[in-house]
Amino acid sequence: MTNPDAPSNPAVCPLQAGAASIRITPPAGTLMQGYDVRCARSVGDPTFASALVAGNERIAWLLLSVDVIGLDRSFTARIRRVIARRLHIRPSQITIVCSHTHSGPATLPRLGPVKADSGYLALLAERLTIVAENAAARLQPVVWRFGTTLFGENVNRRLQVGDSIKLGVDPSGPVDRRLRVLRIDRAGSSDQAAPLALTVHYACHATTSGDALEISADWPGAMRTRLREFYSQEDGYPCVHFLQGCAGDLTHRIGRDPETWPEHFGQSTTIQSQALGRLAGEAAIEASENSVEFSAATVQVGVRSVALPFHNHSGAEKTEIQVVRVGPRRHTAHSASQSIWFIGLPGEPFTEYSTDFGSAFYRRFGGSPHHVLVCGYTNDCVGYLCTPQAVREKGYESAVAHRMYHRPAPFSSNVQSVLLERTLDVAQKLVDEPCEQPFSLRESLRRLAARL
């Protein structure tokens, strides 16, 4: 079912965009992160990093989506500085979102017993720089569109069993089934032309192929393949970005739910990832084909450092949040309400972060909660961001997983309210006092061309 709600009053959009993708597939023999010690015997499907650059008079935003389980702040801070110098922008204008595939290489400093692969991280840093420059070099006039559909293949995984919370399937638990697509078309292209880029936002753990000892982008990779198949043209296919939503307490029905997928129950292989990915691709096609043009005249980015307190333990985790607004120029009528918002959180947020943040943005700025895309695994990966109820109930995410992330304790029950308050502060500042950027688009492209 498609939700036609999208920003209104489409207009000629001065906000240009460029997109590019690059393979980041590690070889067989690579150590994997996500469960216990595993070594990839083969490559099931390629993994990618994709870049989207947006700007008008200035390069304003670079989005990088990466097929890895997560990246910590020390790595993202380094690569953001490198890319910022090359593109003559600020590091704070760069967003790095991870898909959270559990069938990828070891990229976090330590997750469970597996340490990061320093050689792979060096390769990844190089590839991210290349793909960012490629996207910046392809900036062009575009049309911005936004679409939403419902896709019911995710389900809450926190199941009450007696007095305990177990990992399972709870059909009555909180879940956000919205799949949202930011579609970018080349200006002046025909209705039959492939989009320049598709950015797909959905919340579901990428663990469908976890038992297969194969490198894989998991179901988001199969979704990307389906989108490329559908939109393939002689001159190529769209660059597909995947933004993982608030999936901390959400899993996939396939392989986990005997009621809806009895023939796949208990299986976690590439068969399941391909099945879910193709269904997700069909949902994304629906949202894309029913997307509505909106006025994208500017993009603003704000970052705020934040300290997340631990539960019943001294100290706090230093990290950051990021807020991006794409929409009409500020101070025009209803500019905030007609915008698309991207919220980047540094860990594994529960599904209520998506719904509660959307409602809070609606109350503060108007518009629609559908236009607020809350992303996990953004610029950092510090562990689970639970709700106060989950902290009280305990269970894997709120009482055990901090040991997998090598933290002294889970985060406090007030973390959700802290993050919401800080996020609204950043968003309000973007609406009221946007920062000026130091380099024009023309100057940035001139400097980039001189290096190439």
Image (spheres, rainbow, N blue to C red):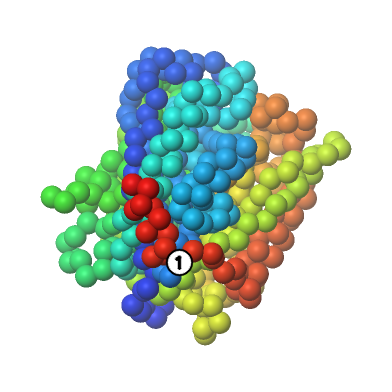
Q: In the visual, does 226 lie left or right of 410?
A: left
Place residue 392 in its image quadrant: top right
Residue at image position (58%, 30%) is 108
Residue 449: percent from left, percent from top = 34, 53
Q: Position of residue 292 (x, y in %)?
A: 34, 70
Residue at the left extreme of this rendering:
234
Q: Is residue 199 left or right of residue 278?
A: right
Residue 273 visible somewhere in the drawing: no
Q: Is residue 77 above or below residue 211?
A: below
Q: Which secondary structure, mark 1?
A: loop
Along the viewing direction, whichever of 260 and 96 lies nearer the viewer: 96
Tell me how many marks there are.
Answer: 1
Q: Amino acid at mark 1?
A: Ser
Q: Which residue is mark 1?
A: 440
x%, y% of residue 15?
39, 69
Say which of 258 and 243 sits in front.
243
> Who is closer to the viewer here, 58 or 108?
58
Instruction: Name which residue lies at 42% across and 59% down.
Output: 444
Query: What residue appears at the point 44 percent right and 45 percent down from the top-left corner?
Result: 65
**Which of the 4 quarters of the picture holds residue 422?**
bottom right
Which residue sits furthest front? 450
Apparent side of residue 110 relative to residue 186 in the rendered image (left or right) = right
Residue at (53, 41) in percent of width and height: 79
Q: Is residue 305 visible?
A: yes
Give percent across and percent down for residue 1. Answer: 36, 60
Residue furthest to the bottom in view is: 333
